[in-house]
């Protein structure tokens, strides 16, 4: 019984730490939204999450080379919108342009990378909540004739 209780305590602590991290992440994300000038392209902060994805060009987001400059590229935050009614389904929108990646100073580079990763972190929570809600709806459906 003690090991089950210990596992429950560990799980509760982990969930609490995720929620605390999520709250802090949102504060950071909102501050960078204004600092990086993304508020000029996306008027309302909550509209950031209408994007299917947010990518970064000119600066790496890879595990092995996080934050490394890609020589000869331009640093730019790109939002991707999916429109299933359009002829071209994906549309890329420049949310912030910073010029040649080699010329971006270290502080700005860190802010840019932090913004993209923080957005992805929050988006993953929202996606998880979406599928959790769908699973809950599915459980409420009558067995016969459903799915």
Image: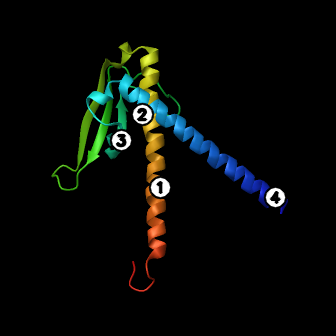
Disc nearer the start of the sequence (4/1): 4
Cα distance between the residues tagged 3 and 2 = 15 Å
* Residue 97 shows in this picture: yes
Sequence-first tag of 1 and 2: 2
Cα gap from disc 4 to disc 1, whole angstroms: 29 Å
Picture coordinates of residue 51, whole percent (x, y): 32, 44
* Residue 116 disc label: 2
The residue identified by callout 4 is 3
The Cα atoms of the two marked residues, 1 and 2, are separated by: 20 Å
The image shows residue 33 at horizontal and vertical percentages of: 38, 29
Q: CA distance from mark 4 to mark 3?
A: 42 Å
Earlier-in-chain disc, 3 versus 1: 3
Instruction: Report which quarter residue 73 is drawn in.
Output: top left
In front of the other: 37 or 82: 37
Please tell me which residue is depicted at 27% across the width and 34% down the height of the picture: 43
Q: Earlier in the sequence, mark 4 or mark 2?
A: 4
Foreground residue among 57 and 95: 95
Mark carried by residue 98: none
Q: Secondary structure at mark 2?
A: helix
Discs 4, 2 touching: Cβ within 8 Å: no
Q: Position of residue 68 (x, y in %)?
A: 46, 23
Q: Which mark is residue 46?
A: 3
Taking the view exactly as shown, the residue that stands out farthest to the left is: 87
Q: Tell me the tag on residue 129.
A: 1
Could you tell me which quadrant the N terminus lies in? Answer: bottom right
């Amino acid at each position: 019984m003690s090991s089950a209780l210990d596992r429950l305590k560990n799980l509760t602590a982990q969930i609490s730490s995720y929620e605390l991290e999520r709250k802090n992440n949102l504060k950071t994300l909102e501050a960078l939204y204004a600092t990086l000038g993304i508020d000029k392209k996306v008027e309302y902060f909550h509209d950031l999450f209408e994007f299917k994805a947010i990518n970064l060009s000119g600066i790496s987001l890879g595990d092995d080379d996080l934050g490394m400059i890609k020589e000869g590229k331009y640093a730019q935050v790109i939002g991707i919108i999916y429109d299933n009614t359009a002829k071209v389904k994906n549309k890329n929108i420049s949310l912030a342009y910073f010029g040649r990646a080699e010329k971006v100073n270290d502080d700005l580079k860190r802010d840019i990378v932090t913004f993209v990763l923080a957005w992805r972190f929050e988006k993953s929570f929202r996606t998880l909540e979406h599928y959790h809600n769908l699973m809950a709806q599915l459980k409420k459906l009558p067995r016969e004739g459903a799915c």
